[in-house]
Image (tube, rainbow, N blue to C red):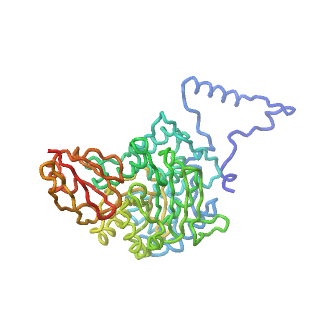
Amino acid sequence: MFASRRLTPQVLRSSSSKLNGRFIPTQRHANRNIMNIIRNALGMDPPPSPFEPSEENRFHPWDSSPSPDLRHRAATIRALAKCPVTGKEINFTCPYSGIPTHHSKEAWEQDTEYHATKKYEILKKVNIYEHDLRSGREFPEFDFPGKQTFESQVNLSNWDLYFYTRQFYSMDTEFQLAAVTKMLSYPVTIGSILHQYSPYLLQPKGPVALEGLKSLAALRYSLYPNQRSNTFKDRPLRLFIIGARAEGQLPGHVWKQLCYLFPEIEFELHFIGPECYYDTDKRSYLTSQKPIVKRVDESLSMIYHTDYFHVFHQAQDFFPYDPYLDSFFTFHPGLAYPDVTDLWKQSLPGLLETKCPIFITGYHEKDANADIKWIMDNFEKDLDVLVNKTDNLFASTKWELNDLNPQETYRFNQFLFGIRGAPYFSNLTIHAISEKSPNESISSSLINGEHVSIISDAVISGMDLPRTFKATLITADNFWKHFKFNPGKLICFVLSELSLDVVWNK
């Protein structure tokens, strides 16, 4: 196996250093002990162990890899990928990266872009990361921490500070980071967007648009019940993972890291898609007419729906949607890829109809740009941008390879952006009751949604519950200033035809 071919003992005790089964120290051992004493006295790090992963002991050409999986991937590249120089099949393995990349050595030498951009350096990282995962070494970095103590606060500025403030195992090598961030990128990306101390700031200092702040404010109202006077909770928060694949195969203890960021909240994770549930016993994706429910504990349920979102949306299986309790995430969906475009044209209108935030990630900038262009070309009039395209601070640090095009490397969730269905308008009547003219009334338009919420610059007071409207207007002038001439300043999500009684304090 891989481990036995790669690892050798650090010190082999010869038979000459033993006598009657008793170990006799030699000059070599004495010298080694002296060096350890000197290192400790000077505060020097111990010498690296040959058992620790490094570029030297993790590098193997894929064609002759100790791992059958990687030998199979090399064969797939040779069979299906094309040389970027000649357009022919790939028969030559790059000596720098150990991965098949070109038709011949001559084509490899002629590929000036490949050498000028040093693509082989990233391909080499792909190689050594894949071998490390299959090396058979111990993975102490997968021993994740439990609940966060209430007196400590997590820092979501980047991976290093997140790991430090959550008291993860100290990850000193790029191999440990690559292994852990590939798994945690999904839950921590979600948490970093929704958290009250999110690293993504409002424009112009960050990528979050004003509409995005409104949607995030609604979700955070529910995520932090102790910060409001009414702590009523009618159901768990639902996080819909659309087009789930690898994220649906993550074990519950990985998704629990999301729960630890919001310790008072009960979550339902809804994985939706024909490849969302993988049966490890049958080694195939399972299709079920009924939702498959896995309850991890009292605060986390994982529910699998093995069909496309538009099927469930048309059947109203998830109704009613609630912008305070529901949000959607789709991880590198490839909206612009011809193979899936027709399916997304059926699902995305339903996602926009929910009026709930939708967050999307991309493998790399080209992938994210293609998805954004496809969305805008087809649905620009039906949506608002919540988060402009930005680097995902919690992207995976592990480099991956497209076996059909070995020149294409990427990392999971490298970019992200967010959208939401644009609100639609309905003519409603506002009865403005004046102390001097109690019969006066006016007509105007409000945003038609599902709940009542108000965001304004000290215009409205008395607003406490998101589902009721009991407010006293400060002055009539402020009312007209913020509403009549700029309706966007007064946000009212209403359930249906509704009359709002407003008292003018003159």
Viewer-proximal residue among 211 and 109: 211
- Residue at 48% over, 56% down: 399
Q: Position of residue 454 (x, y in %)?
A: 28, 51
Viewer-proximal residue among 406 and 500: 500
Q: How many marks?
A: 0
Q: Quadrant of residue 27?
A: top right
Q: Position of residue 369 (x, y in %)?
A: 34, 63
Q: Quadrant of the C terminus?
A: top left
Viewer-proximal residue among 501 and 63: 501
Reply above or below: 497 against 473.
Answer: below
Residue sitting farthest toward the right: 20
Reply above or below: 294 against 465.
Answer: below
Q: Is residue 20 left or right of residue 506?
A: right
Q: Is residue 46 visible?
A: yes
Q: Quadrant of residue 141?
A: top right
Q: Quadrant of the N terminus?
A: bottom right
Q: Position of residue 432 (x, y in %)?
A: 18, 54
- Residue at 83% over, 31% down: 22
Viewer-proximal residue among 220 and 443: 443
Q: Is residue 419 left or right of residue 126?
A: left
Residue sitting farthest toward the top: 41
Q: Is residue 15 left or right of residue 60?
A: right
